Image (cartoon, rainbow, N blue to C red):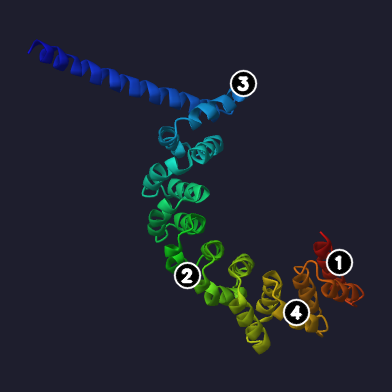
Amino acid sequence: MIGLKIKYSLLPLILLFGIAFAGQGKEEIRHEFLVLSAGDLSYHGQQEKARKRLSKQGENAVRIAIEYMDRKSIRKAIAIKWIVEDAAEDAVVPLTYVLTRPDKGNAAFAAYLLGKIGSRKAAVPLMLAAGSSSERLRSASIGALGECGDTCAVPILLQALTDSLASVRRKAAHSLGLLEDKRALDDLISLLGDSSSNVRYAASYAISRIGGEGATMILLERLDKNSGGKIERYHIIETLGALGSKESLPVLYDLLEDPFYLNRGFACQALGHYRGNYEVANALKRSLHDASGFVGMMSRKALSSIRN
């Protein structure tokens, strides 16, 4: 009985010590964070050491760093980013909680950071955040989903391709390219005629990453039908080059003789992707003497690309 009394009488002291120790640990982490995020030059020599010490704290350091998101300080934001990068997977759970915060600026920053980590564990929370009415959070979440590598996000990303915001459409196209899912090809090709140049280039990038004969055939057929506008046509030509398919070469060679100088110029740009092909190089050399200065410039850039 005496032993039990001593044991239980010590329990409050043990708990009190544990709480005090935990509090002290938090304060130490907080101090290191403030050193890391300080703008004062007098702390410059200490910041690298502070980051190393914080990197050993993992999730605990992330939780303390997140407390400073509301400060809206560039130095604080950079320090949070460093801590999250060092913590990697350990930062996922704390950041997913931030996605549900009322401050959508902080939530958008958390979505961006989750994209930097690129963990599949973040895919579901990001898919939920992608339906937000906040433009910032929706855009950041859509952009982060591609980095997570989970193709379960493809339906949501396909839906985002029709978003009213060009920034969301661009990020959705880029994310689909990162996921390299062939289900997205038709929708991405339709974006080559988008009203936003950023969206068009993102769609071209995504199509070239997904690749495959299917993409080349769809683009060649669309080019042959000439159903789209001039801008869409230029991006189709550019994307055919990025795909680098041999099936596209006869069409690209024909375009070098096209009456319209822009078609000739973009054909030169497309041929610049065919490195190590002497036939392509010779065709581009002939285009150096084109009557259009634009075509001459594009052929020189393409030849430089092939050589490098």
- Where disc 2 sits, the SS reads helix
In the image, taking residue 300 as reference, residue 151 lies left or right, namely: left
Circle 3 is placed at which residue position? Answer: 42
- Where disc 1 sits, the SS reads helix
Between discs 4 and 2, the one toward the N terminus: 2
Position of residue 292 measured from the top left corner of the image (x, y, whole percent): 87, 76
Callouts 4 and 2 close, C-beta under 8 Å:
no
- Where disc 3 sits, the SS reads helix
Which marked residue is nearer to the observer: mark 2 or mark 3? 2
Position of residue 212 measured from the top left corner of the image (x, y, whole percent): 60, 74
CA–CA distance between discs 4 and 2?
30 Å
Callouts 1 and 4 close, C-beta under 8 Å:
no
What amino acid type should be assigned to the residue bearing mark 3?
Ser
Circle 2 is placed at which residue position? Answer: 158
Circle 4 is placed at which residue position? Answer: 249
Circle 1 is placed at which residue position? Answer: 300
Position of residue 255 measured from the top left corner of the image (x, y, whole percent): 78, 82
In the image, taking residue 134 as reference, residue 238 lies left or right, namely: right
